[in-house]
Amino acid sequence: MADRFPKATTTSVTCDVLVVGGGPAGSAISALLAEKGWNVHVLEKDRHPRFHIGESLLPHSLPMLERLGVLSSVEKIGITKYGAEIVSPYHGRSRILYFSKALDGSQPFAYQVKRSDFDKILIDNAVAKGVHLHEGVRAKQVEFRKGSTHLIQTEDQSGQPLTYEAKFVVDASGRDTFLSSQLGGKHRNPDHNSAAVFGHFEGVKRLPGRDEGNISIVWFDHGWWWIIPFKDGTTSVGAVCWPSYISTRKVPLEQFLKDTIALCPPVAERMANATLLGQAYAAANYSYRRQTMSGDDYLMVGDAFAFIDPVFSSGVHLALNSAILGADVVDARLRNAPQYSHCMREFQRTVRLGVKTYSWFIYHFTQPAFRNLFMSDGSILKMEEAILSVLAGDAFGKSPTRLPLFLFKIAYYLVYLFNFRENRAAHRRRVRGVPETVTSLKDYAVPHRS
Ligand SMILES: Cc1cc2nc3c(=O)[nH]c(=O)nc-3n(C[C@H](O)[C@H](O)[C@H](O)COP(=O)(O)OP(=O)(O)OC[C@H]3O[C@@H](n4cnc5c(N)ncnc54)[C@H](O)[C@@H]3O)c2cc1C
């Protein structure tokens, strides 16, 4: 690898830890490492506040935000989300699932936040703890040098190169997957693929009273919709669709978003008086993961390791969780501490468990059998409470969800068999979409890949 590394420019910054990416994962891990006394630098190719998707938080993220010292600030920018409204045009009705009914009801609400504000709070918090932030600086390549410090080539927005020298590199570059792009090993998810079109709107009808801040999830023939209300009266609305549907696009993205809204009456009804604010956005071909998430002197946190479909709003939660556990790994490694192996095992086990827990639900969410089970009232053998626990972010084995979730899966397969033809057709449709690549959309989050 060293021979492919371009000749170094003037090395001018040395540090203990270099974090690539100043999203939730990068801000969280850098803040915690700075707290532990390490000299941490963060590179962010963009400048905060900046647009980002991923606006619905989970209740079990709140203790993590408290741990980081930002919960009261997040509270001020967020609207309270007590649950999720699930709308099924196939059943002609909706139902609201409340987090307070989860097995561990200790976290009965979360917040919906504009990511521009949320991410700014997190990065400001890191800087306040002593992190050195370099905005408008993109990491381009890293040279790992065995038994020595590692060199990271960067470039600022004017094209000025600069080399950083660090003992440890954290990849928190999100779906840009900075290290995977260089080292390889990133695999598209063989079981799932989808793409999304979305935007911020004003004038979207809200749920009444206390439910105003809830997320709405709406099934439709090409995938599913989210409606996420914000505190300032605006709303995030987006559709996650099979690539086969997105590939049919012949019109500009904004028109495509409007046409897609018209295909889903429950969403169209809430958006009868809505206006798009700014532009429409897209994210394509986005379910992937990597076999490994670490090496001797590097770690991948958040989306840099894996990205799963956002139907359960799990992205920020998984990113924060991996960052918090990752901070202990990096700290132990830098101190050469005996608990390093234990921290690493715990980090890897928990990160994989989180991704796994959500994945089964994501793969089956749009199946008729799943819809039927989700829309049926009443809970048998704590199955609903267990699902609510997962929806609330209790996904790392804290509550005894294993047995009820197992029973739910059995119930799912029985309902599937009961209506075999319809379910098999839906399954085939989803699986057919997996190898497809959406080439017509440029991912908003990675406008200028190099
Ligand atoms: C359509 C869609 C809907 C979603 N909805 C939700 C939701 O409702 N709730 C939820 O929790 N999650 C949601 N997510 C997921 C969520 O967006 C991510 O999981 C979350 O942002 C991950 O945080 P992160 O810090 O790992 O990455 P990011 O938030 O993506 O941060 C990475 C940062 O790294 C920077 N960067 C990238 N490359 C470089 C480089 N080479 N050098 C310097 N900087 C770099 C980027 O500019 C960015 O600021 C959604 C995702 C999508 C695509």
Image: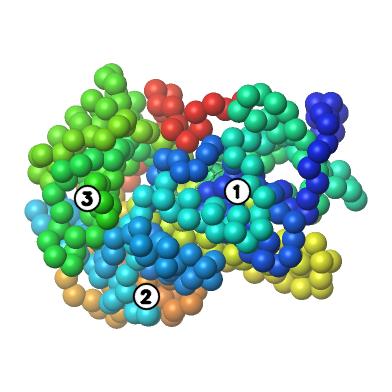
Apparent side of residue 269 relative to residue 31 in the rendered image (left or right): left
Question: Mark 3: few, some, or many residues within 10 Å (few <14, many ≥20)?
Answer: few
Report x, y in % for residue 255. Answer: 23, 25
Residue 233: give its label: 3
**Mark 1 residue CB less than 8 A from any atom of ligand 1:** yes
Apparent side of residue 240 relative to residue 180 in the rendered image (left or right): left
Report x, y in % for residue 166. Answer: 79, 48
Q: Which of the 4 image quadrants contains residue 152?
A: top right
Q: Is residue 297 visible?
A: no
Report x, y in % for residue 386. Answer: 35, 74
Q: Determine whether 345 is above or below 227 in the image.
A: below
Marked residue nearer the N-terminal end (2 or 3) = 2
Instruction: Tell me which residue sits at (21%, 58%) in the image.
Output: 86
Marked residue nearer the N-terminal end (1 or 2) = 2
Question: Disc 1 marks which amino acid?
Answer: Ala
Q: Determine whether 50 is above or below 379 in the image.
A: above
Closest to the observer: 118 or 73? 73
Marked residue nearer the N-terminal end (1 or 3) = 1
Apparent side of residue 431 relative to residue 376 in the rendered image (left or right): right
